[in-house]
């Protein structure tokens, strides 16, 4: 009986928890050793997303499949409601993306700017978030945060 209860509890924590979250599911693909990616996943969870973290040692293939231009890749890739979110994009910009639903594959905050969610330090300048299409065409500024 105890073993069955323990298995059920583990199953509920791993599978059932996201079903109770208020926000959409966010699947974060990250390098297993990256701490800023883990911090970003925690940030998303703290802001209402149902977060699933997938450790992935071949992020290059994930970025390519999402259509992210190589120079605009983030240190991790998050898939939210059919959109790719590259790097440490603030949730206000993600909310704008999900509300407007533009005809793009995703958005990206290239590099790892100080002061961005999941990164340490102070924000030195506004973040320019770019939108990109899956065909690899040049990204255009989508939002400034």
Image (spheres, rainbow, N blue to C red):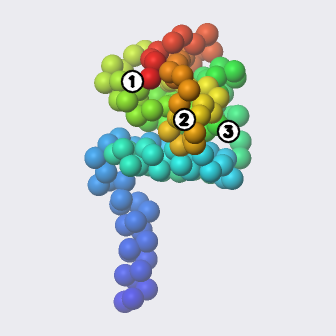
Residues at marks 2 and 3, CA–CA distance in whole angstroms: 27 Å
Q: Earlier in the sequence, mark 3 or mark 1?
A: 3
Neighbor class of circle 3 (other Cα within 10 Å; few <14, some 14-19, many 20+) is some
Front residue of 110/13: it is 110
Q: Secondary structure at mark 3?
A: helix
Residues at marks 1 and 2, CA–CA distance in whole angstroms: 25 Å
Q: Residue at x 57, y 42 (%)?
A: 120
Neighbor class of circle 1 (other Cα within 10 Å; few <14, some 14-19, many 20+) is many
Q: Which residue is mark 2?
A: 122
Pointer 1 with pointer 2, Cβ within 8 A: no
Q: Is residue 16 left or right of residue 130?
A: left
Q: Which residue is mark 3?
A: 59
Please state which of the two labelled residues, at mark 2 or mark 3, is closer to the viewer.
Answer: 2
Q: Secondary structure at mark 2?
A: loop
Neighbor class of circle 2 (other Cα within 10 Å; few <14, some 14-19, many 20+) is few
Asked if residue 111 is positioned above or below residue 144 in the image, the reply reads below
Residues at marks 3 and 1, CA–CA distance in whole angstroms: 23 Å
Q: Which residue is mark 1?
A: 97
Give residue 36's position: percent from left, percent from top.
60, 46
Give residue 94's position: percent from left, percent from top.
41, 29
Q: Secondary structure at mark 1?
A: helix
Q: Residue at x 35, y 24 (%)?
A: 96
């Amino acid at each position: 009986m105890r073993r069955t209860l323990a298995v059920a509890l583990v199953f509920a924590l791993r599978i059932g928890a996201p079903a109770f979250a208020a926000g959409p599911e966010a699947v974060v693909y990250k390098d297993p050793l990256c701490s800023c990616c883990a911090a970003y996943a925690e940030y998303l969870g703290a802001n209402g997303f149902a977060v699933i973290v997938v450790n992935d040692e071949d992020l290059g293939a994930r970025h390519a499949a999402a259509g992210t231009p190589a120079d605009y890749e983030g240190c991790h890739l998050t898939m939210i409601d059919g959109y790719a979110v590259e790097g440490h994009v603030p949730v206000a910009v993600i909310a704008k993306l999900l509300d407007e639903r533009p005809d793009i594959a995703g958005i990206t905050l290239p590099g790892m700017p100080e002061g961005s969610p999941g990164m340490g330090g102070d924000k030195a300048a506004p973040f320019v978030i770019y939108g990109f299409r899956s065909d690899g065409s040049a990204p255009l500024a989508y939002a400034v945060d």
